[in-house]
Image (cartoon, helix red, strand yellow):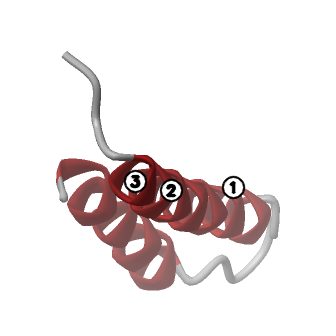
Amino acid sequence: MNARPELVEILRLWVRKAEHDLEAANRIMAIEEGCPFDTVCFHCQQAAEKYLK
């Protein structure tokens, strides 16, 4: 099954955005004191939604 090139590009963009959310979560978790875990969870949830789209 071949997907249209436009669709493949849109999927790549969503995956890239999801990876950026995970990278943000990882960087925020690197904060040793006062890490805002609610923000980490938000970025993880956003990444999951983007991967599912």
Q: Nearer the viewer, mark 2 or mark 3?
A: 2
Q: Residues within 10 Å of mark 3 (few under 14, many from 20)?
A: some
Instruction: Work out which quarter of the rendered image holds the C terminus and state it.
Output: bottom left
Which residue is denoted by mark 2 in the rendering? Answer: 9
Residue 45 falls in which quadrant of the image? bottom left
Residue 38 falls in which quadrant of the image? bottom left
Which residue is denoted by mark 3 in the rendering? Answer: 11
Residue 24 falls in which quadrant of the image? bottom right
Q: Which residue shows up at 52% across the image and 51% down it?
A: 12
Q: Nearer the viewer, mark 1 or mark 2?
A: 2
Instruction: Work out which quarter of the rendered image holds the N terminus and state it.
Output: top left
Amino acid type for the residue under numbered disc 3: Leu
22 lies left or right of 31: left
Q: Which residue shows up at 81% across the image and 69% down it?
A: 31
Tally of numbered tags: 3
Which residue is denoted by mark 1 in the rendering? Answer: 26
* Numbered disc 2: secondary structure: helix
